[in-house]
């Protein structure tokens, strides 16, 4: 069906578009901006008065524990593609599992599901999973989720093997030994509250190792959920050296620090941990400059797994439905203009993935988010479609709400 | 940020941590404890302040001394005391901490004395009680992970005040495994709140938390330097498991550098007192000649501990 989106402010960061004009969609693709293509007859008109029309959000990290609810949550948050880490139960280490996930996602027909295959069997960091088979089944790259590869030789071989086929590897850099007993950033707050610390060196040592192996193997690597200023500085230098390395930050890390743990708030437990204010500012600068993409790191955790003492509570927060408002909140606080902020959740992740989506050029796939930037709403467990009601923002007011979401030219929300 | 220990009027309803409590409340606890010292010396060692109330000792981690002193304190306040050794009961069957609490609240518990291996566990319980609207049920932290042991911190303050009178002229050294010590954290907050001008931490880098200076503490690695002219020395217990990892080479090497010997004690003020939260490792952190010497006040600490725990329980839950 042909659709025209009227009266909206169209922001397409990748192509430098920011203007009020109608957007025309035909055959699941963007057919025109401003002027209707020849012979266009709209079957549906969407009124986007007061709204912003931008590419659908691409989330570089969302766990889909209950896939139907989480994909509904995605499109309710304006997210049209989700990258799914392999740390499901069971881990995504066999082609059949990936195949099933992709088909289930297509069947549900909400956000696109882009699975990351397990790099190693059972994510144990020992034996390689069948990477080519997983790729064929629809995995876009390979990852250990938040589990490190302890054995450096295994990591080297995995990168050599991946480089052979030009597969990308996604790694969350965290030294196993330095992080294994820790539950919070090794800083002032952990010292005060008596929480075992995870030093920044846990991240920088892992990044240093990975950078060296990228130099040696040429393997493409995406580093996920960077948490420290020092880590970001290493990545910046590697980029300067033209190494094929990209990175992302979780949106919560752009807004929160170790101080938000307060009196042991389990909702402020993250992996990697929230770090100090200077770390937060460096992550913010990296996101502003385009060094890092922004993702939700959506991690639904049941209430029983959060109502525990801080160190026993599962880390992570719900993210799909707050990625947009929290990115807007960050942009406002960090004085980042709206098109740049939107680029970090659309064009930048598309670039990481090497996908042509994340833009609204004529011919691009019509994955679109229409949101009201002024809409304010209170985040409560009831407002979330996700099964994960775990958020440090429960009770807070959010600004920015997706009104309509299209995937492949179909209205899915 | 709301401090869950205080009600809207700023009164103490739980004792979870010394941190964040105003000086007036600490002084109130110490003064109340002083008034209870006389009770323990009577033939009939009882006052009716908690008569009809049920105190549940919830020890998720083993302890003999602390549990016993809480039990004695509660009984001297005329409370009914129920000791629960949770290691062997509910949680072994998979019950969550808050389910256990709900069950005990249903049994009309008035006060929980909680020891738990996880830092922050008593905060979780206090917040839960607030959420379910039971502000008539109180929590006293008897030690949570590495975080806090506020009644030990307060009994240490009582001891210091007893022997030194004025906090504002003192130099206090805390020696040993501060990283893993909940006692040290409570002592540091109590000392700085009560106006001690110089608090020192002495230990090897592996046993000191990062950013200790942010808590207002001066760090010393050399014990001879750190003890110089101190009025109070608080020795900490070195757990056996600390000597098996990479934190320390051996008990012997630790004792040579950080064990309190008569020679090292001589560097402090001649009237310095030596404290220890117990149980002591003789020959590891403290030489027997010091532990049994005239400057040690380790046993009076235990006696004062009962009065301090009576004071805390009567203030948070008294009739």
Image (cartoon, rainbow, N blue to C red):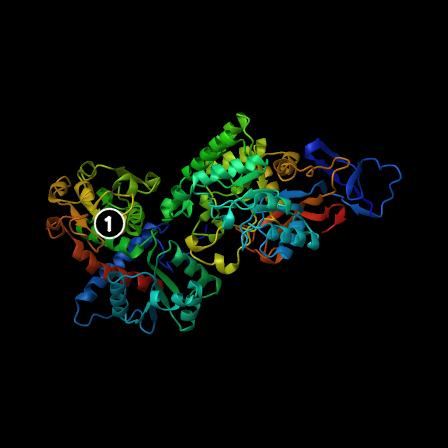
- Circle 1 residues within 10 Å: few <14, some 14–19, many ≥20: many
Position of residue B10 in the picture relative to residue B285 (left or right): right
Chain letter behind tag 1: B
Q: Which of B86/A1 is in front?
A: A1
The image position of residue B189, as x and y in percent, is 32, 47
Residue A247 seen in this snapshot: no
Residue closest to the eye, A2 or A289: A2
Q: Residue drawn 20% across and 52% down? A: B276
Vertical relation: B29 (above or below) A120 = below
Q: Is residue A373 visible?
A: yes
- Which residue in the protein does label 1 denote? B238
**Where in the figure is residue B167, as x and y percent of width and height?**
24, 46
> Which residue is depicted at the point 42% across and 36% down?
A205
| Residue B137 as seen in the image, left or right of residue B275 | right
Compare residues A221 and B126 and report the one nearer the observer. Answer: A221
Residue B36 in the image: state x and y as whole percent. 23, 63
Q: Quadrant of residue B200?
A: top left
Residue B312 against residue A208 in the figure, above or below: below
Secondary structure, mark 1, is loop
- Along the line of sight, which residue is nearer the eye, A287 or A115? A115
Q: Quadrant of the C terminus of chain B?
A: bottom left
Instruction: Locate residue B161, reporting x and y percent.
Output: 21, 51
Look at 31% across and 64% down and name the residue there: B314
């Amino acid at each position: 069906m042909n659709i025209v989106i009227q009266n909206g402010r169209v922001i397409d960061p990748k192509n430098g578009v920011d203007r009020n004009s109608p957007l025309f969609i035909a055959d699941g693709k963007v057919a025109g901006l401003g002027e209707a293509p020849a012979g266009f007859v709209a079957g549906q008109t969407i009124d986007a008065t007061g709204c912003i029309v931008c590419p659908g959000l691409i989330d570089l990290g969302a766990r889909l524990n209950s896939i139907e609810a989480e994909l509904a949550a995605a499109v309710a948050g304006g997210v049209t593609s989700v990258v799914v880490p392999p740390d499901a139960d069971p881990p995504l280490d066999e082609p059949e599992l990936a195949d099933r996930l992709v088909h289930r996602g297509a069947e549900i027909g909400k956000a696109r599901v882009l699975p990351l295959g397990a790099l190693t069997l059972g994510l144990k960091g020992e034996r390689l999973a069948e990477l080519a088979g997983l790729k064929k089944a629809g995995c876009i790259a390979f990852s250990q989720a938040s589990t490190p590869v302890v054995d450096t030789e295994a990591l080297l071989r995995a990168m050599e093997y991946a480089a052979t086929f030009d597969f990308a590897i996604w790694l969350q850099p965290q030294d196993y030994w330095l992080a294994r007993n820790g539950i919070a950033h090794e800083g002032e707050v952990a010292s005060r509250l008596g929480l075992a610390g995870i030093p920044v060196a846990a991240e920088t040592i892992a990044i240093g190792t990975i950078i060296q192996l990228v130099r040696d193997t040429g393997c493409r690597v995406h580093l996920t959920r960077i948490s420290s200023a020092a880590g970001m500085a290493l990545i910046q230098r590697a980029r300067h050296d033209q190494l094929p390395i990209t990175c992302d930050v979780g949106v919560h890390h752009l807004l929160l620090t170790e101080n938000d743990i307060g009196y042991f708030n389990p909702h402020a437990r993250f992996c990697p941990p929230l770090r100090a204010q200077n770390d937060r500012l460096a992550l913010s600068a990296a996101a502003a400059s385009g060094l890092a993409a922004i993702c939700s790191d959506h991690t639904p955790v049941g209430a029983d797994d959060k109502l525990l003492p801080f160190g026993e509570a599962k880390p992570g927060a719900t993210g799909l439905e707050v990625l947009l408002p929290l990115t807007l909140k960050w942009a406002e606080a960090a004085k980042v203009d709206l098109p740049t902020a939107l680029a970090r959740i659309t064009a930048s992740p598309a670039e990481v993935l090497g996908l042509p989506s994340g833009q609204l050029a004529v011919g691009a796939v019509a994955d679109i988010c229409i949101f009201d930037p002024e809409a304010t709403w209170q985040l409560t467990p009831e407002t979330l479609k996700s099964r994960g009601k775990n958020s440090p923002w429960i009770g807070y007011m959010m600004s920015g709400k997706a009104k309509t979401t299209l995937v492949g030219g179909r209205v899915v929300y | 940020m709301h401090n869950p220990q205080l009600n809207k009027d700023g009164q103490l309803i739980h004792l979870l941590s010394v941190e964040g409590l105003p000086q007036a409340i600490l002084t109130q606890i110490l003064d109340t404890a002083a008034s209870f010292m006389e009770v323990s010396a009577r033939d009939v060692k009882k006052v009716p302040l908690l008569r009809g109330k049920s105190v549940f000792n919830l020890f998720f981690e083993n302890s003999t001394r602390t549990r016993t002193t809480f039990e004695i304190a509660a009984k001297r306040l005329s409370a009914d005391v129920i000791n629960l050794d949770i290691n062997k009961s509910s949680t072994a069957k998979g019950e969550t901490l808050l389910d256990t609490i709900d069950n005990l609240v249903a049994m009309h518990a008035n006060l929980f004395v909680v020891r738990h291996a996880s830092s922050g566990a008593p905060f979780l319980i206090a917040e839960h009680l607030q959420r379910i609207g039971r502000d008539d049920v109180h929590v006293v932290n008897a030690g949570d992970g590495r975080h806090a042991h506020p009644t030990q911190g307060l009994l240490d303050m009582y001891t210091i005040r007893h022997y030194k009178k004025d906090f504002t002229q003192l130099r206090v050294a805390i020696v040993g495994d501060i990283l893993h010590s909940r006692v040290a954290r409570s002592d540091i907050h109590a000392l700085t709140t009560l106006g001690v001008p110089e608090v020192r931490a002495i230990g090897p880098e592996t046993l000191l938390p990062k950013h200790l200076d942010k808590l207002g503490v001066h760090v010393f690695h050399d014990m001879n330097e750190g003890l110089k002219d101190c009025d109070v020395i608080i020795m900490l217990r070195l757990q056996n498991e600390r000597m098996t990892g990479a934190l320390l080479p051996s008990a012997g090497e630790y004792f040579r550098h950080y064990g309190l010997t008569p020679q090292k004690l001589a560097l402090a003020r001649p009237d310095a007192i030596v404290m220890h939260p117990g149980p002591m490792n003789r020959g590891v952190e403290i030489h027997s000649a010091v532990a049994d010497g005239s400057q040690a006040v380790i046993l009076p600490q235990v006696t004062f501990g009962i009065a301090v725990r009576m004071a805390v329980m009567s203030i948070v839950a008294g009739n």
